[in-house]
Every structure is written in structure tokens, then in C-alpha cells.
Amino acid sequence: MPSLNETQINSLKKRAAACSVCLAVTLIVIKTIGVLYTGSLSVLSSMIDSLADLFASSITFIAVRFSSQPADCDHRYGHGKAEALSALIQSAFIAGSGIFVIYDGITRFISPRPLEQTVFGILIMGISLLLTLFLIAYQRYVARRTNSQAIRADAAHYTVDVVTNISIIITLIVVYYFGLYWFDTLTAFLVSAYLLLNAYRLAADAVALLLDRELSRTIRENVEKIVLSTAHVQGMHDLRTRDLGGIYIFEFHLELDGSLTLDVAHQYSDNVEAEIRKLYPSAQIIIHQDPAGLKENRLDHNLVGNCQL
């Protein structure tokens, strides 16, 4: 699949974010009707989850537009980390929604209420499920092509919706055929627990990006392999990596023959950059050239812990 340029990437992300907002509004309307007709707590929990998704999708839409702005004098690394901030805000809102549903579930358990129009509720949740599956398929495509954390986080929200919708459909079927009304409350508790778990995972990923956690071992190994297999390179050290919201930064010291002229050493460094960009086209690469065999105080020697790669 051919690589996309920056304009195409930004356009894809904006379309995916806009589709997410539109779907969230549609699902809220559909599920609100379902709650009014059925009185189901599990349908209510799903509707509240859709409210959270609308908020999250709106934040994603704003963050994607902001992160797409080019670097400026005050933000020379660009604005990509706005996507991580949006994911962090989303996780807090989702966690709050999960806690609200748990509270409502406890209240409903103390004062149970029979459900009505369960067949209609099943129809509502079935429509919601199909619409959500279409959006997730598109979002995952966009996330693969753009490496956008905000779009990936939004897709994760709607993946939770798929799980909740299926569980609610099962709940309504159980209530309809067996009259086990407590099963509705139980499902709401399980959905809420899953929401809280998902909120924690999103928050952890967002905080990791904001704190410049190193990229995966696989990516670092790929970079090292590319560098060391490039002609005239005698070694490398002090590799540091980070994610700026879909744009990777690779920084390292390149070990070359110390007798080379600056012009030739610069050309060899450019060759290394070109090879890395074949695999990571949007990467920003910072190379410090060192004479091979130079004895110096290196970052690799001063890192806390037994760091490999």
C-alpha cells in the first residue's frame, strides 16, 4: 500500500473524526428512543456510553484539526501531542460514565423495574451494532494509514460499543424469554466495568506518549538494523525515540570513519536517513556524527536500569 503525504494523512484523519461525531449523534437519538420504550438499564448504560462517545469524538475532531497544523515558531515539533491530550480527556469522561451507570445499577437493584417493549429494544441495539461496525472498519483503516492515536482511541471506544451492544441484545433476549429482570442490572455492571478498564488503558497510553516513552522494541530494532546495514556505517549508539502523535522521532549517534571530510560524513548520514524513511516515511531523524572508536561518556552508559536497545 503506497505511503500517504501529510495532506492526505490529515484529510483522512479529519474525515474519520467527522464520521465519528455524526455516528455518535445518530446512536444517541436511536438509543434514547430505546430507553423510553423499554426502560432497560442496560440500554440506558449504552446510551450514556454513546454520550461519552459524542464527547470523546468531538474532542478527537478538535484534536485532529489542531494536531494537523504545521510546526510554528512556538511549537517546532508540531502539534501532534494534542491527540494524546484528547485521549486523556476521553478516558476521564468514559470513567465517569462507567461510575454513573454503576450507581444507577445499584439504585435499580434496590428498586427493580420491569422492562417493556424488549423486542423493540433488540431492534434498536441491532441497528446500533451494524452502524458501529461500519465506523470501526473505517477508523481502523484510517488509523493504519495515518498512525493517529486519536483515531485509534476513538475506534477503541466504538469497539467497546460493539461488545456492549451484543451483551445488551443478549440481555434483552434473556429478559424477554425468561423474565430474569436482574440480568439487565448485571449486564449494566459488566458493561460499566469494561468501560472503566478501557478508560484506564486509554489513559495509560496517552500518558506514556506525553511522557515520551520509547517506541516499541520492534521499531527500535528495525532502526538499528537499517542503520548498521547501510554502507560505510561502523556503528551507532545513544538511540532515542519518541512519538509526536503519529510522527516518530529517531535520534542517535552515527559512528563513521574519523578521517572522512565533513561533506562525505554528511552524505553518509543522508544515506542513512533515506534508508530509514523507506520504512518510516514521516519520521524526523536527528543524527550526530562520531568518529568510530571514540571514547566518550554516552547516554547508553548513564540510563537507569539495564536498558537493551
Image (cartoon, rainbow, N blue to C red):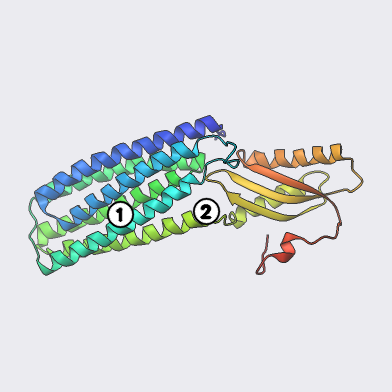
Q: Is residue 246 left or right of residue 229?
A: left
Q: Which residue is mark 1?
A: 163
Residue name at image x 83 percent, y 45 percent: 232
Instruction: From the top left corner, tell me how far across and down residue 198 is, in percent.
Output: 37, 58
The 10 Å Cα crowd at callout 1, few under 14, some 14 to 19, many 20 or more, is few
Q: Could you say where residue 6 lies in the image, as x and y percent from the top left?
A: 55, 33
| Residue 136 visible, this orientation | no
Residue type, mark 1 in image: Val
- Residue drawn at (24%, 39%) of the image: 26
How far across and down, in percent of the image, does residue 28 sit?
22, 44
- Of residues 126 and 238, which is closer to you in this image? 238
Q: Which residue is mark 2?
A: 210
User: How many marks on residues?
Assistant: 2
Task: Name the residue: 67% across, 69% down.
Answer: 306
Of the 4 image quadrants, the one containing the N terminus is top right
Sequence-first tag of 2 and 1: 1
Rendered image: mark on residue 286 = none
Q: Mark 2 belongs to which amino acid?
A: Leu
Q: Is residue 219 above or below residue 107?
A: above
The quarter of the picture where residue 278 lies is top right
Any part of residue 89 in sight: yes
Point out the image quarter for the C terminus: bottom right
Q: What element does badge 2 sit on?
A: helix
Q: Residue at x 34, y 48 (%)?
A: 158
Furthest-right residue in view?
259
- Mark 2 and mark 1: Cα distance apart in space: 29 Å
